[in-house]
DNA sequence: CAGTGGTCTAGACCACACG
DNA sequence: GTGTGGTCTAGACCACTGA
């Protein structure tokens, strides 16, 4: 183990992932070394190994079986997009080898609508930066995304040449504000005409919609986003744990 | 702390939840005692307290802020359904105080379709038990659910008088098979006419669809389910973590 | 039975927020 | 500085699986 500053468990997780990909730890469907052995191998305690494995399990990369061992999951599930990890659409597409382009980017500063002010927990009418864009894959529009950010967090002038369209990537790249998590509401919606136009669909077409609030580590909401997805291009999944107390 | 056999952290989690509801620990939006204090209060180690808090955080009941403290989340988010925890729709509705009824239950044993066999990872044509039902709230249909279970796991004869309609609840209640987790694909779909009829909607209406595989602890898939939700009655959300390595 | 993952402890130090 | 949550360790015992 080398660097500091990034949690040991994170580093171990990456090491294990690399080991799986390189085939030096185990192959697809294969059995990983026991937690104790992994701990010795990486020179960390078993608790740290368990934290790393917990993260890998949550993103569907491994399967753990009590009394048996830890197995590598089938590769398909790793490639897909688990919703538990927040990732920009651009990055997700890139990871699954899909080439995307951005189109119709619209950036503007304006007062927040009442709904936006409520979702961002800022005073009504506060200045916000709005970034809307369409994502194309194979020349076809596949998603329409809108980010709304308080002007206190991001100004139009902050969007340099390198801006990819993703507010999330920009935050992560510049490290400011420090991010905590995102909370996404999941819904299905019929396309309003304005959105249908951007996605080259008829009005009323079925769309998957994510409505998310992005939280900074200090608890502020630093982004409110709406994402509309044309069915068939992205597959989102969630791993759902069994609640041991649900039958109490 | 009392009983054994159910993990300490689970018990502590329930205690904290009760303490929040009873107002003896903290009120909505209020600050909880520190982890050290909670540990002393319940007579467990800090690690156990942290495990309990992690579970509460994942279901959106609390918010943790480094260097500040742990807060009770606004009650609305507690009432909602975090997708990370697998729970039957019946139980979910019950938890948010929504009275539901089951209608049009259809139970049959038949050979698996090729698609079902693939999803269940059983031989094509294997016998499966299919349970379909409509969920009503306020006399209105709000969801249509189909469970498909290998006959080797569940037979029609196993569905007793107490059967609520939920295969998941039945599994949890009888403790067999021991369950691991569920993997749900999330999509939006226009209602086919057969489903539109059951939900009293026009054909092509927008529906949220969950397509899930339920895994037993031995890795078998013991249930393949399709769930169609009429927008507006249930709200699903996901908490998305920041991947610290995503900008590497 | 031996070996695995699951739970729990006690104690340590670090990183962060706030007065 | 003080107190919080975040990370990590070393060691213990339990519960499960399979030979």
Image (tube, coloured by chain):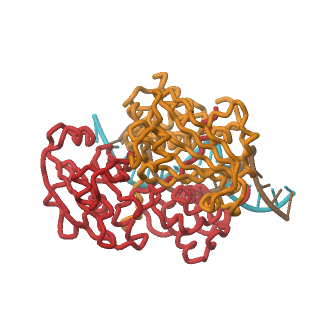
Chain colours: A red, B orange, C cyan, D brown
Depth check: give the residue in front, A129 or B199: B199
Quadrant where the C terminus of chain B is found in the figure = bottom left
Report the residue at 50% width, 39% height from top: B56
In the displayed structure image, the side of residue B229 where residue B41 appears, left or right: right
Report the residue at 50% width, 32% height from top: B136
**Residue B192 higher or lower than A14, as above or below:** above
Q: x and y percent of residue A99 in the render?
A: 35, 73
Quadrant where the N terminus of chain B is found in the figure = top right
Report the residue at 14% width, 46% height from top: A127
Is residue A35 visible in the rendered image? The answer is no
Q: x and y percent of residue A113 in the render?
A: 18, 41
Quadrant of res B77: top left
In the displayed structure image, the side of residue A116 where residue B175 appears, left or right: right
In the displayed structure image, the side of residue B124 where residue B186 appears, left or right: left
Q: How many numbered discs sit on the rendered protein? A: 0
Is residue B205 visible in the rendered image? The answer is yes
**Residue A50 higher or lower than B56, as above or below:** below
Depth check: give the residue in front, B5 or B133: B133
Q: x and y percent of residue B231 in the render?
A: 39, 41
Quadrant of res A247: top right
């Amino acid at each position: 183990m080398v660097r500091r500053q990034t949690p040991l468990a994170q580093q171990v997780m990456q090491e294990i992932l690399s080991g799986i990909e390189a085939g030096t730890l185990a192959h697809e469907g294969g059995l990983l070394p026991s937690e104790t052995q992994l701990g010795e191998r990486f020179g960390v305690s078993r608790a740290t190994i368990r934290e790393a494995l917990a993260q890998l399990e949550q993103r569907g990369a491994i399967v753990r079986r009590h009394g048996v061992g830890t197995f590598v999951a089938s590769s398909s599930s790793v490639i897909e997009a688990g919703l538990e990890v927040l990732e920009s659409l651009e990055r997700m597409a890139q990871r699954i080898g899909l080439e995307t382009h951005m189109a119709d980017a619209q950036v503007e500063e304006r007062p927040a609508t009442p709904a936006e002010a409520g979702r961002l927990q800022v005073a009504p009418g506060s200045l916000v930066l709005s970034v809307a864009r369409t994502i194309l894959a194979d020349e076809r529009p596949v998603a329409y995304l809108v980010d709304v950010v308080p002007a206190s967090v991001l100004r139009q002038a902050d969007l340099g040449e390198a801006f990819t369209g993703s507010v999330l990537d920009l935050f992560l790249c510049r490290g400011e504000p420090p991010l905590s998590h995102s909370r996404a509401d999941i819904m299905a919606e019929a396309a309003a005409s304005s959105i249908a136009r951007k996605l080259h669909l008829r009005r009323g077409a079925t769309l998957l919609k994510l409505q998310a609030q992005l939280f900074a580590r200090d608890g502020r909401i630093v982004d409110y986003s709406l994402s509309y997805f044309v069915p068939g291009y992205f597959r989102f999944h969630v791993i759902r744990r069994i609640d041991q107390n649900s039958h109490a």
